[in-house]
Amino acid sequence: MALNKEFAARRLHSLLGIIPIGLFLMQHFVVNHFATRSAEAFNGAAHFMENLPFRIFLEMFLIYIPILFHGIYGLFIVFQGKANAKRFGYFRNWMYIFQRITGVFLLVFITWHVWDTWVQAQFFGAEVNYQMMADIVANPWMLAFYIVGILSATFHFSNGLWSFLVTWGITVTPKAQLAATYFTLAVFVAMSVIGLRAIFAFV
Amino acid sequence: MSDAQAQETRNAEETDTKKVKFIITRQDDPDSPSYDQEFEVPYRENMNVISALMEIRRNPVDSQGNQANPVIWDMNCLEEVCGACSMIINGTARQSCTALIDQLEQPIRLEPMKTFPVMRDLQVDRSRMFDSLKKVKAWIPIDGTYDLGPGPRMAENKRQWSYELSKCMTCGVCLEACPNVNDDSSFIGPAAISQVRLFNSHPTGEMNKSERLEALMGEGGISGCSNAQNCVEVCPKGIPLTTSIAAMNRETNIQSFKNFFGGGN
Ligand code: HEM
Ligand code: SF4
Ligand code: FES
C-alpha cells in the first residue's frame, strides 16, 4: 500500500521537530552559552561553527528546510484546530493551545532572528560575533523580544517532546505520559536557564 | 404529627409548587437559526432531564404562558448505554437520561452538541461517527459459506481491558470535546481509534488488524490527533481513550514501516 500522504506528512512534521530542529536548538543554545565565559569564548565558538565543512549544506538540510517545512505545515495544522479551553480547561488542553501560540510566535521570531543575523552576514557584509548581538539587545525592546522568543522555543520544544513521545507510541500508559510530563518540565527549565543565561551575557 | 411526618408533608407541598426552570436552545430545522426558549416544569422527585422534557412535550407552554412547539430530542435506552440522548447540559456534554434535576443548577441550560449538524432542537445527526466506524472496519468479519468452527480463546487479562473499550456507546461527547474535530478538519476523532484497538485485541478480529490500521493511516485518520487529551476527561464511560490513541500510534507506525520496508502483514 502506498504511504498515505497526510499520515506521512504529520509523522515527518513530528520527527523534524526533534530531529533535527530540536537537536539544533540545543546545539545553538550551548554555543551561545559560551558568551557567559567571555566575548572571545563566544566568538571562538561561533567561528568554529562558521567554518564547519559543507556549512551551506549543513545549514540547508539540518536547519532551514526542516524548519520551513515544520513551520509552514505547523501553521496549516493550527488552522485545522479550534481552541476550546474556555469550555474544557484541562491541563493538556492548555498545553495544546500554548503549543500553537508559541509555534506561531516562533515563526515570526525565527524569521526576524535569521534576518537580523544570518541574512545580514550573508548579504550585507556584517559579521556574526559578540558585538553584533550586544548591539541588538542594547535595545530593551529587542531584549524583551529575544527573551520571549527563547522561552517560546524552550516551551515549544519541551512540550513538543512530550507529544512526540505519544505520537511515536513511546509513552502509551497514563503513568508513562505523566512521567514524561515531569521529564519534559525539567527539560523546559534547564533549556530556559541555558538560553536566558546566554542572552543576558550580551547585555 | 411526628417530625418525620411533618417533613414529608412539607416536602409534598413544596413538590406541588416547586418549578424547574429551563432555558432550551431551539432550532426549527437544520438550516434555520437557533433561538432560546424558557420553560418552567413542575418539580417531581427523582426527575431527570428527559422526564422534564417529556413534561414539556405533554404541556408545551413556555414560561410566559405562550403555546410552544414541543421540544425534540433523541433517546433510546434511558440507562446511559445507547448514547442517543447526549446534549449540552449547563455547558457540559453528557447524557440527558442520567442528568438528575436535583444535581443541576437552575436555570438548567439545554443545548444541542455543537460538533454535529442539528436536525431539530436538541436532536443532532451523529452519522459521521457511524461512517467512521465503517471506515475503520469496527467489526469482526466471520460470515462465510461454511462453518469456520470456534475461534481462538482470549487471555483473561486482555479481555479485562478490552471489555472497558467495548463500553463505547458512540455518544459523541469525546468528539464534542476535541479541538481537532470540527468543520475545518476531517479528523474522525477518538472513539473510532479506540474501537480499532478493541477489535484488533480480539483473537479473531486480529486477523484483519492491518486493514483497520491502514484505515487509521488514511485521510482524517489517527494523525489528526494533537494530544489535547480532553476526550479522556469527558468520556462518560471512562474509556482510556488517550491510551488507545497512543497504542494505535505505535501500531500504525509499525504498520507503515512494514508496508514500506516489508515484513509481516
Ligand atoms: C524552535 C523551533 C521548533 C521546534 C524545536 C519545534 C518542535 C516541535 C516538536 C518536537 C513538536 C511535537 C511534534 C509531535 O506532536 O509529535 C512540535 C509540534 C508543533 N509545532 Fe513545532 N517546533 C518549532 C517551530 C515551530 C514553528 C515555527 C511552528 C509554526 C507555527 C510550529 C508549529 C507546531 C505545531 C502546530 C505543532 C503541533 C502539532 C500537533 O500537535 O499535531 N513549530 N514542534
Ligand atoms: S469514547 Fe466515550 S465519549 Fe467517546 S463516543 Fe464512546 S462513550 Fe462517548
Ligand atoms: S437514552 Fe440511551 S444513553 Fe440516554
Image (tube, rainbow, N blue to C red):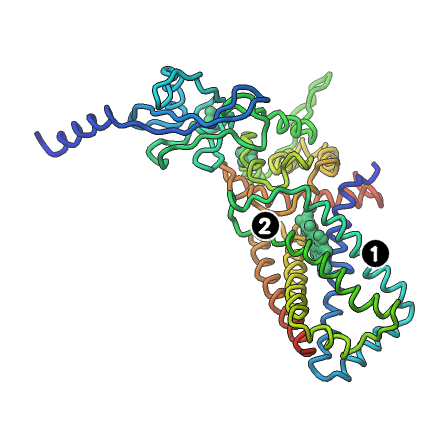
Tell which tag, 1 or 2, sits nearer the viewer: 1
Residue A51: which quarter of the image? Answer: bottom right
Q: Position of residue B4 (x, y in %)?
A: 14, 33
Say whether mark 2 and mark 1 are on the same chain: yes
Q: CA distance from mark 1 to mark 2?
A: 34 Å
Q: Earlier in the sequence, mark 1 or mark 2?
A: 1
B176 is higher (above) or lower (below) than A25:
above
Q: Position of residue A6 (x, y in %)?
A: 77, 41
- Which is more toward the observer, B35 or A183? B35
Residue at the disc numbered 1: A65
Residue occupying the point 66% across, 70% down: A143
Visible in this render: residue B168? no
Quadrant field for ligand 1: bottom right
B71 is higher (above) or lower (below) than A5:
above
Q: Position of residue B86 (x, y in %)?
A: 50, 29
Q: Does ligand 1 reach within 8 Å of label 2's beta carbon? A: no
- Residue farthest left in this picture: B1
- Residue farthest right in this picture: A54
A125 to the left or right of B111: right
Q: Amino acid at mark 2?
A: Thr
Residue at the disc numbered 2: A173
Which chain does the numbered disc 2 sit on? A
- Which is more toward the observer, A61 or B121? B121
Residue B112 circle label: none
Label 2, residues with CA under 10 Å away: few <14, some 14-19, many ≥20: some
For the residue labelled by badge 2, is the local secondary structure a helix, a strand or a loop?
loop
- Which is more toward the observer, A11 or B21? B21
Give yes or no for contact between labels 1 and 2 (Cβ–Cβ under 8 Å): no
If the image is split into quadrants, where does the N terminus of chain B sit? top left
